[in-house]
Amino acid sequence: MAYNSKNYLKRVRFILNVYQPVKTPDIPDTKIVSKVFPKHNINISYSQWMNIKGMSVPKNP
């Protein structure tokens, strides 16, 4: 994906910013990964999403 760690963290922040307003308790993550993310040009697998979701991402410097 991204070779520069700063670029990767930017992408992770973008993905999490897309995820946060959409997520509600009645919408499963699999539906968000398959339906919502592609609308924002985010094409990742569910396992990649679980790795991103589990990361501790520092705030913008």
Image (cartoon, rainbow, N blue to C red):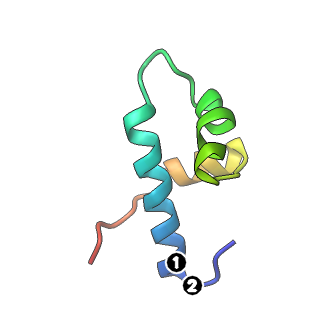
> In the displayed image of the protein, which residue is found farthest to the top?
26
Q: Which amino acid does label 1 sit on?
A: Asn
- Which residue bears the numbered disc 1? 7
* Residue occupying the point 46% across, 42% down: 19
**Residue 28: horizontal and vertical position, in percent?**
56, 23
Q: Of residues 41 and 29, which is closer to you in this image?
A: 41
Q: Where is residue 1 in the image (x, y as percent from the top left)?
A: 69, 71
Q: Name the residue under label 2.
A: 4
- Residue sitting farthest toward the bottom: 4
The part of the image, by quadrant, that contains residue 50 is top right
- Label 1 CA crowd tier, 10 Å (few <14, some 14–19, many 20+): few
Between the residue at mark 2 and the residue at mark 1, the CA separation in whole angstroms equals 5 Å
Comparing 33 with 51, the one in front is 33
Q: In the displayed structure, would residue 11 be above or below residue 44?
A: below
Task: Classify residue 26 as left or right of residue 29.
Answer: left
Q: What residue type is labelled 2?
A: Asn
Q: Mark 2 falls on what kind of element?
A: loop
Q: Is residue 59 above or below residue 7?
A: above
Q: Where is residue 43 in the image (x, y as percent from the top left)?
A: 70, 52
**Residue at figure coordinates x 46%, y 70% from the top left:** 10
Q: Residues within 10 Å of mark 2 (few under 14, many from 20)?
A: few
User: In the rendered view, does 43 fall on the left or right side of 4?
Assistant: right
Q: In which quarter of the image is residue 22?
A: top left
On-image quarter of the C terminus: bottom left
Residue 31's x, y, as percent? Answer: 63, 27
The residue that appears at 29% across and 71% down in the rendered structure is 60
Q: Which residue lies furthest to the front in this view?
A: 39
Q: What element carries label 1?
A: helix
Q: Is residue 55 left or right of residue 2?
A: left
2 and 1 marks in contact (CB < 8 Å): yes
